[in-house]
Image (cartoon, rainbow, N blue to C red):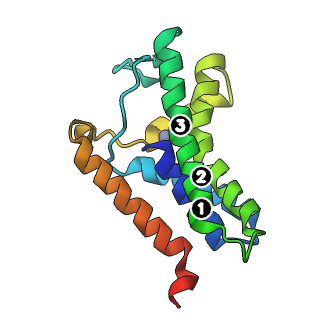
Amino acid sequence: MTLGTHAIIGAAIGSVFADKPGTALALGWVSHYFFDFMPHWDYHLRSAKVDLENPLNNDLSRGKDFYYDLAKIGFDALLGLVLGVLFFVNLARPEKLVAVMAGIIGALLPDFLQFVYIRLRREPFIALQKIHGWAHSSYRELNKKPSLGFLLQLSIILVAFLIGNWRLFR
Ligand SMILES: [Zn+2]
């Protein structure tokens, strides 16, 4: 799932657990695996070298494509961060910012740890990579339907927005 969607889910969790940043971080982290488990659309990475036989051999090629991908991933994560803060932190309760940030960091960690794994290829990152791969949906058909995939992620964002702002609707 895109980092933006993961980040907004994490921010919503932080908003619900506004005075428990530790809980927000942990639940944000767990939410990443849960939402990767759902069939979803992901954008293509030019530098990805995929080994279908053994995903633990997946790699990223260095060079121009890698920096292009890094810019795309960075923009995706930044967009999620900005929207997450805009959606769930208001001036009346600025203290929520800590929990919302913790939720976002937790939700983005598993994908960040994939980079660490690819660089280091040693424990505990091997185990974490295995968990991530195991949790990740093997249904890839949605990648062929980007507009449907995009709409589905937009719906998840909308639901996250409503849950994170439930106080507004009481
Ligand atoms: Zn992931």
Could you say which is closer to the camera, residue 115 or residue 4?
4
The label shown at residue 82 is: 2
Question: Could you tell me residue 94's position as x and y percent?
Answer: 75, 69
The label shown at residue 141 is: none
Of pointers 2 and 3, the one earlier in the residue sequence: 3
Residue at image point 54% right, 25% down: 70
> In this figure, which residue is indicated by the disc labeled 1?
86
Look at the numbered disc 2 and give the secondary structure of its residue: helix
- Tag 1–tag 2 contact (CB < 8 Å): yes
Amino acid type indicated by mark 3: Phe
> In this figure, which residue is indicated by the disc labeled 3?
75
Amino acid type indicated by mark 1: Leu
Relative horizontal placement of residue 102, taking residue 76 as reference (left or right): right
Amino acid type indicated by mark 2: Val
Badge 2: few (under 14), some or many (20 or more) residues near its Cα, within 10 Å? Answer: few
Cα separation, mark 1 vs mark 3, equals: 16 Å
Residue at image point 35% right, 19% down: 53
Q: Is residue 30 visible?
A: no
